[in-house]
Image (cartoon, rainbow, N blue to C red):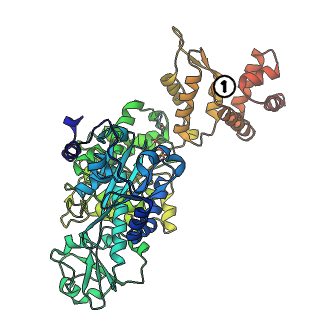
Amino acid sequence: MKSAIQPWLADSWRRSEGAGLCEARPGYELKLSPVELEERCERHRQLIALVESEALPLFTRLMAHTESRLILSDAEGFVLRHWGLSRYSDRLANVALDCGVNWLEEHKGTNAIGTALKAKEALSVVGEQHFCRPHRFMSCTASPIFSPSGELIGALDITSERLRHNQQTLLLISSLAQQVETALLCALPGGRFRVDVAASRQLLCSGWQGILIADDDGRLLGLNPMARQYLGAAAPGMKVGELLGDDWQAQQALCSRGELHLSTCAIGTITPSQAAKSTNAARAPDASKASNSPKTQSVTSTWGAHGIKPLHFHDPQLESAWQQARKVISRKIPLLVQGETGVGKEHFVRQLFQESRLSGELVAVNCAALPAELIEAELFGYQGGAFTGAARQGHLGKVRQADGGFLFLDEIGELPLAAQGRLLRVLQEREVTPVGGLKSHRVDIQVVAATHMDLAHMVRDGRFREDLYFRLNGLQVGLPPLRQRADRSRLIHKLHRQYRLNAPGDEQQLCPQLLSLLEAYGWPGNLRELDNLMQVACLMAEGERELGLTHLSDAHRRALMQACAVQSASEPSLKAGLDGRIQATLAECDGNISEAARRLGVSRNLIYRSLKRTVS
Ligand SMILES: Nc1ncnc2c1ncn2[C@@H]1O[C@H](COP(=O)(O)OP(=O)(O)OP(=O)(O)O)[C@@H](O)[C@H]1O
């Protein structure tokens, strides 16, 4: 393991060995007494309170359903507090979470809290990367926290038993630490004005802006690392007017320093919590890892794993959508794919990407899964070294990662309004400026967005920017729901062939009664539902000669039969088809209605109704 690890990890393992730790044991137990712990917590009262008000709500929203816990340590590595669902924490509590336990590297070997405090950088220590074997069941991601004067004051960590920590966890923990730091800055005694500075208007409230806090006389009390990045020589004690020009108190004014924009407000008109909400600058993960992001990997693997060949072309609406889409992507015109959930929008886009033969990657961004606080970092990346604690290489961001390929914005309707503005600019100018940087980078991307929502309706309601809607909507194609597809029967057979587990020497058949029920069903979950149903049913029917209604789950059996009954009462053509099948089955069963109902998987009443129709 040691030979393959990254330099920071190798260094940390060397330090752990140097401290005399043994891999087989859990390190040394250094623990505060209850009185000592209480004293320490009292000293860090403000920090604990700000973690609870600024970081805990977002952690809870995103991670409450997981087995993760949020842990706060002080700069000396002592755990002060932890939060999360206690029912999950038994094993973690025994090993990791006890308040008062010290997690410095010299006591516990490589671990996220100790190593982040040492490296002064946000990082993840996943399973086997822990130096001590008893810690390897955990995955931890931690970020250092700095005071407004730049002093290291603690570490914030997310630890879980099973969850694999990924780039998003790293962004999340960095963002949480950043929010706490901003709240500390805004709470500086004597602070009267807060001035936000950024390279563009959109960035001013993106969470990536520079922040300066000044007193009544306009003298600088503190500033965040991003402000330092923008204003170079700025330091506490200086007059804000010297840095930003005399009109600095005018809201949203264009500053005299080149491209910089600024916005000023009096402290007291914003709460620390509001302040932190507009500040989410995350310590970015290593940009060199960006192309291996989990989402990108999953794009490739899903494609390979399913191995689904194009089945679209036997439905006229889909065929037309496909032909139109092919034409616009060869000219880099933005494409908007609309369709109900599960109709195969992502699958369609991947096929287009293959068709395009572009040299770049298909980079998928699930706008619904991205918390608003992480969007800027995830999409636009940020400059290396822009923040204290930031990874040196910075973060490339999805837009630049997609250069030369497809940027696939899935669930675009879920993108928060604030991020819509910046995305619009990128699409208009084909340039992206990483947060913290003044230099923009040209990108050559095919933009494809997908949604199950009615964007035009959202524009009318003011929930989606009209200008972005028109920018994304070079061509809009709609994918039909499965219940309207002319090739339903083909799809059903195709998936059956794909998943069936045949009896030796015998190819499993699809029971015709089941086929007609599947064809008549409404498929609210579309292809996703059909795919799941077929996979499970084929497992249940392993080795049998025929796949029938009995191999379906109770819920699906009931749903299919109900749908069939409803449809038979409402749709004449379907009714006629069903009547024909009922008559044929009745003939096979010598007129035995109960037996025919059993074989068809429908109620006897349905058969009586059908008989009435055919007799009259
Ligand atoms: N042409 C196809 N043939 C067979 N199965 C398909 C096909 N297209 C998609 N699927 C299956 O349907 C499921 C949903 O597909 P996909 O994720 O592309 O839908 P979607 O419309 O993007 O869904 P959502 O709106 O929920 O994101 C996948 O599991 C995939 O395996």
Residue 67 rendering spot, x and y as whole percentages: 48, 47
The residue lying furthest to the bottom in this view is 217
Q: Quadrant of residue 371?
A: bottom left
* Residue 140 visible from this viewpoint: yes
Image spot of residue 82 (x, y percent): 44, 57
Residue 382 x/y as whole percent: 25, 60
State the residue at coordinates (45%, 35%): 312
Q: Is mark 1 within 8 Å of ligand 1?
A: no
**Number of marks in picture:** 1
- Across and down, in percent, residue 185 comes to 32, 75
Asked if residue 444 lies left or right of residue 486, the reply is left
* Secondary structure beneath label 1: helix
Is residue 382 depicted above or below 601 in this figure?
Answer: below
In front here: 260 or 10? Answer: 10
Q: Is residue 489 visible?
A: no
Q: Residues within 10 Å of mark 1 (few under 14, many from 20)?
A: many
Residue type (three-letter) at the residue carrying disc 1: Leu
In the image, residue 309 above or below residue 484:
above
Which one is in front, 501 or 477?
501
Q: Nearer the viewer, residue 294 or 223?
A: 223
Seen from this angle, which residue lies furthest top? 505
Q: Residue at x 43, y 56 (%)?
A: 99
Residue at 55% across / 23% down in the picture? Answer: 539
Q: Quadrant of the C terminus?
A: top right
Quarter of the image with the N terminus in it:
top left
* Residue toward you, 305 or 229: 229
Against 55, residue 244 (above or below) is below
Q: Which residue is mark 1?
A: 549
In the picture as drawn, the residue positioned furthest to the left comes out as: 233
From the viewer's perspective, is 367 left or right of 616? left
Residue 309: quadrant of the picture = top left
